Amino acid sequence: MARFNFFGEGLPEIDLEELKGKLIVLEGTDGVGRSTHIGLLKEWLENHGHAVLDTGMTRSALAGKRLKQAKAGNTLGGITMSLFYATDFADRLENEII
């Protein structure tokens, strides 16, 4: 399997070969049953002996609160909001997921 690095190293100081888990992402607009599917998948995985971390957008300690405020206020442009979401995910990836 080919190994690709995008935008430099991606995860500095982390050996990607040592990461044993899987990142499963479920996307969808509000009201389509995403939370229901996440709950069912989480229950199934745990019943089959897998540890599960349920995390979501706007939940990081670093950016979550301010990101929710920015969404409610409609004050930031698309690029800025995308960078805000990327910050939120990077913080959760480093401090919760890995």
Image: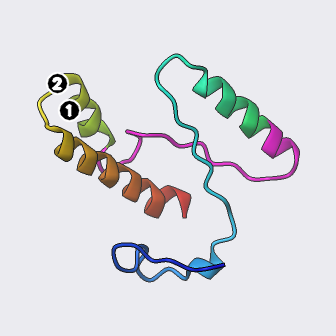
Where residue 11 sits in the image (x, y, percent)? 43, 74
Element assignment for label 2: helix
Amino acid found under the numbered disc labelled 2: Gly
* Dominant SS type (magenta): loop
Query: Which color mode does the image show?
Result: rainbow
Count residues near mark 1 (Cα–Cα under 10 Å), then give few for <14, some for 14-19, many for 20+: some
**Residue drawn at the location 44% of the way across and 83% of the way down:** 13
Q: Is residue 27 above or below residue 45?
A: above
Q: Is 50 rendered above or below residue 71?
A: below
The residue stretch that appears in magenta:
44-63
The quadrant of the image that shows the C terminus is: bottom right
At horizontal 11% and vertical 30% (from top left) the residue drawn is 75
Residue 74 among those drawn in magenta: no
Whether 58 is among the magenta residues is yes
Q: What amino acid is found at the position of numbered circle 1 in the picture?
A: Ala
Q: How many numbered discs sit on the rendered protein? A: 2
In the image, farthest residue toward the right? 48
Mark 1, secondary structure of its residue: helix
Q: Nearer the viewer, residue 84 or 28?
A: 28
**Residue pushed farthest front?**
2
Which residue corresponds to the image point at 20% horizontal and 32% vertical from the top-left?
70
Percent of width and height locating residue 36: 66, 24
Q: Are marks 1 and 2 in contact (CB under 8 Å)?
A: yes
Instruction: From the image, tell me which residue sits under label 1.
Output: 70
- The residue where tag 2 is placed is 73
Residue drawn at x 27%, y 38% is 67
Q: Does 47 sit above or below residue 38? A: below
Q: In this view, does 92 lie above or below 72?
A: below
Q: In which quarter of the image is residue 78?
A: top left
